[in-house]
Amino acid sequence: MIIGDKSIQADIKSESTVLVEVWSDYLCPWCYIGEANLDNAITELGINAIVVYKSFQSNPTLQGAYTVSEIARQSGFSLEEAKKKSKYIEDMASRANVELHMDSVIMVNTMDAHRLAYMAKQKGYGKAMAKRLFEASYMEAKNIADPNVLAAIGEEFGISKEGTLAMLKSDQYRTEIKSEIQEGLNNGLQGVPYFVINKKYSLSGAQPKEVFKETLSGILKDDGPYKPLISKSPSGYTCDENGCEVPNK
């Protein structure tokens, strides 16, 4: 069973629980495939897993909207080469029980999609929103940088259109997205998808289902279920991005 990410502390109850943090981008087909393989592995193993989705931008400077073929031409690939690569990715997706339509995907900057996903994650819909954004990109050929498209998707999760549009017009969640990206880089991320298991082990790339099964089984066998740190110390003074605490004396 895959548990949502609303409250990690509250959900860690099972003796077969693993925590999997996933860095991905919604216009990365290997992310969609890799996450499907992870889900299939968890289901077949019959374990409880808490999957937390985190942000990464594979093309953060992209401006405008382009087809995969247009991007390929800009990168020096012929149309025939682009179609061949797309077919290979679609075949790999099919093996993971995922449907992709590479030729109709609209390539855009994904920052706003990540901001909507972060908003949804605060409401306990992190995994569901991630899946929905992948579907919008790869099955429905939607422009996930379009505020109205994102607002409509948000409404499917109980987020008002006005709330989404107001968030997108502001800088809300940009700092959090950049922080998640930096966290991944600090953990050794060099490309997505990137998986960190139980805050200790990592896997990179769209690994096959069998690799996930073997890895998760081995971790549970060697380390047991994930247990979050339990603080044994009283609260002390700390420093954060706003500065250092100073007692009033």
Image (cartoon, grey):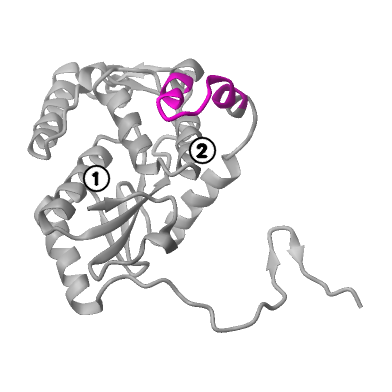
Q: In which quarter of the image is the C terminus?
A: bottom right
Mark toward the start of the polypeptide (2 vs 1) = 1
Q: Residue 113 carries which label?
A: none
Towards the viewer: 228 or 7: 7
The amino acid marked with disc number 2 is Met
Whether residue 160 appears in magenta in the rendering, the answer is yes
The amino acid marked with disc number 1 is Glu
Q: Main secondary structure of the magenta part?
A: helix
Towards the viewer: 54 or 57: 54
Residue displayed at 57% across by 22% down = 165
Position of 225 with respect to 7 (left or right) is: left
Towards the viewer: 158 or 164: 158
Q: Residue 119 carries which label?
A: 2
Residue under label 1:
35
Pointer 1 local density, CA inside 10 Å: few below 14, some 14–19, many at least 20: many
Q: Is residue 47 above or below residue 140?
A: below
Residue displayed at 40% across by 42% down = 126
Pointer 2 local density, CA inside 10 Å: few below 14, some 14–19, many at least 20: many
Total number of numbered discs in the rendering: 2
Whether residue 117 appears in magenta in the rendering, the answer is no
Position of 107 with respect to 151 (left or right) is: left
Residue 224, quarter of picture: bottom left
Residue numbers of the magenta segment: 151-166
